[in-house]
Image (spheres, rainbow, N blue to C red):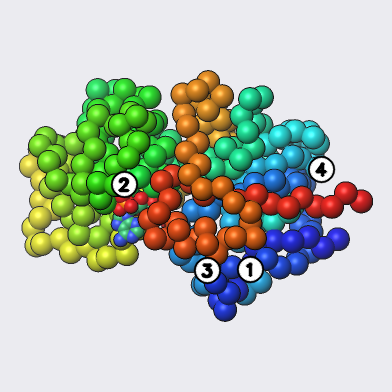
Amino acid sequence: MDIRALVADPAAPASLRLGTVREPEPAAHQLVLDVRHISLNRGEVEFAGQLPPGTVHGYDAAGVVSRAAADGSGPPAGARVAAFGAAAWAQRMAVDTGAVAEVPAGVGLADAAALPMAGFTALRTLRTRPILGRRVLITGAAGGVGRYAVQLAALGGAHVVASVGSRARAEGLAGLGADEVVIGLEGIDRPVDLVLDTVGGAQLVALWGLLAPGGDIQHIGWASGEPAEFPPHSLFSLGASRTLSTFGDAREVGPDLATLLGFVAAGRLSAEVDRRDSWENVAEAADALLARRVAGKVVLDVDPVPAP
Ligand SMILES: NC(=O)c1ccc[n+]([C@@H]2O[C@H](COP(=O)([O-])OP(=O)(O)OC[C@H]3O[C@@H](n4cnc5c(N)ncnc54)[C@H](OP(=O)(O)O)[C@@H]3O)[C@@H](O)[C@H]2O)c1
């Protein structure tokens, strides 16, 4: 059977168009999800034009299981789940059962679709060290990863410093748990123990100078697209080593997704869906995300597969 999907097309606006593809064939450890909502992430939108034309794009989805995994793992048919996996932006996706989590009653599927990539990235980078009572700096704090990181760092007992690009982008962050909201790195008067950096560029160089001995920068993304030039000898450090760590661990995210959904169900985490639209309007939504007009997440509604 054919289904509709958002596929890469370098000639289309935002390099994405709704096309028709064959329904996915699940492996034994995969379930089939009837997708109801998807979410966009900056990295996917930025790199859509580099995919082979016709590739089904996207990683974040939520919907209803239409076929359980053949090996007996994972949720049964009819379960509401959030999912993380390739080729998510389609009416149906085949996804590893280790990369899904059931959505608790009371949590909407649109909110669930917002969580996967940005949520587990924030959770996993914050979990790299104890943060209770420590100073945690989050750059790009107004964005998708950033708004989850601010909330989760506050939940973990950190003193949260949220960095944004402009005064307008500071809106709402104190309410999410930021103790300080700064424009760029202006006004940070004491060293920080952990940085979650999604911006890169010259700001990454400056971040190094703000790091306490023993502190770590979790390098998540490079939204600025600008080069970072470290002056000679600037990485020398007296005392406990300071570190710059890469992050890109998307293995077995199911349990972390369940944790995030549990926080949402308990009212401890907001999904921060700032823009909700039909997937027909993916180009406008992608433009808004790239232009820094989205405070948090973009979620798009997917037309369901017609009933047989
Ligand atoms: N390593 C991984 O596994 C992983 C996972 C998820 C995301 N990422 C990466 O992390 C970054 C953030 O992702 P996201 O989904 O949170 O993106 P997002 O929602 O678009 O947020 C990005 C933030 O970066 C800030 N920014 C600063 N300078 C910018 C510039 N020149 N152009 C655009 N934005 C700029 C913006 O803050 P202001 O508007 O306040 O200036 C914006 O809020 C992306 O680079 C993404 O690819 C990596």
**Please, what is the three-letter code of the amino acid marked with disc 2?**
Arg
Does residue 115 appear to the left or right of 293 in the view shown?
Answer: right
How crowded is the residue under tag 3: few (<14 C-alpha within 10 Å), some, or many (20+)? many
Residue on which disc 3 sits: 14
Q: SS of the residue at dot 1?
A: strand
Kindly report the distance in space between the C-alpha atoms of the residues bearing marks 2 and 1. 30 Å
43 left or right of 98 in image:
left
Q: Which residue is mark 2?
A: 169
First along the sequence among labels 4 and 1: 1
Between circles 2 and 1, the one closer to the viewer is 2
Distance, label 4 to label 1, CA atoms, is 27 Å
Dot 1, crowdedness within 10 Å: few (<14), some or many (≥20)?
many
- N-terminal label among 2 and 3: 3
Q: Residues within 10 Å of mark 4 (few under 14, many from 20)?
A: some
Determine if the C-beta at disc 2 is less than 8 A from ligand 1: yes
Q: Earlier in the sequence, mark 2 or mark 1?
A: 1
Residue 46 screen position, x and y as percent: 46, 64
Q: Residue at x 56, y 24 (%)?
A: 265
Between tags 4 and 1, which lies in front? Answer: 1
- Residue under label 1: 17
Please name the amino acid that badge 1 sits on.
Answer: Arg
**SS at circle 4:** strand
Q: Secondary structure at mark 2?
A: helix
Mark 2 → mark 4, Cα distance in angstroms: 42 Å
CA distance separating discs 1 and 3: 8 Å
- Residue 163's x, y, as percent? 25, 44
Residue kind at label 4, given as amino acid type: Arg
What amino acid type is highlighted by mark number 3?
A: Ala
Q: Foreground mark, 3 or 4? A: 3
Mark closer to the observer (2, 4): 2
Query: Which residue is denoted by mark 4 in the rendering?
Result: 67
Nearest to N terminus: mark 3 or mark 4:
3
